[in-house]
Image: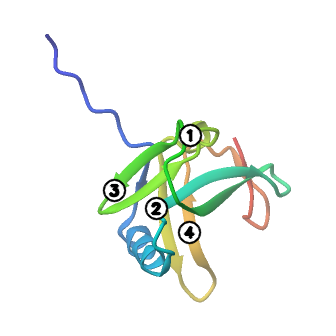
Amino acid sequence: MAATKALPKAITLTDAAVTRVKALMAKAPDDMIGLRIGVKARGCSGLSYDIQYAKEKLPFDEVVEDKGVTVMIAPDAVMFLIGSEMDYVDDKFETGFKFRNPNEKGRCGCGESFHV
């Protein structure tokens, strides 16, 4: 019987993203178990990333546990996020989560939305 190879995580998180998620969870209401990442139809390019607190794992959520944090990916967002890296940037020009997404085919000029 051949050994099965572990599937790669749907997304990975940089150390900066993990640090920010831990900080957010430390301030979150007690009933939150992690963050949920989704995509919404929005912006001039079509889609934008949506990050919310998660109280529970919903049916068909993809659960990613990475470096001590839990992130759930909404089932309708998985196909848009597979292979992505979630980072957190805090510099003089921008602050927030950033996604390096190999599925993106383009972004709008302001960088708020993308298309695949």
Q: Residue at x 29, y 61 (%)?
A: 67
Distance between mark 3 and mark 2 Cα atoms: 11 Å
* Element type where label 4 sits in the image: strand
Q: Which mark is residue 97?
A: 4
Q: Nearer the viewer, residue 96 or 50?
A: 50
* Element type where label 3 sits in the image: strand
Q: Which residue is mark 1?
A: 78
**Residue type, label 4:** Phe
Q: Nearer the viewer, mark 2 or mark 1?
A: 2
Do tag 2 and tag 1 residues touch (Cβ < 8 Å)? no
Q: Can you tell which quarter of the image residue 102 is in?
A: top right
Do tag 3 and tag 1 residues touch (Cβ < 8 Å)? no
**Residue type, label 1:** Val
* Element type where label 1 sits in the image: helix
Residue 27, percent from left and from top: 48, 81
Do tag 4 and tag 1 residues touch (Cβ < 8 Å)? no
**Residue type, label 3:** Asp
Distance between mark 2 and mark 1 Cα atoms: 17 Å
Residue 49, percent from left and from top: 66, 57
The C terminus, quarter of image = top right
Distance between mark 3 and mark 1 Cα atoms: 16 Å
Q: Which residue is mark 3?
A: 66
Q: Which residue is mark 2?
A: 34
Crowding at label 3, few (<14), some or many (≥20) Cα neighbours within 10 Å?
Answer: some
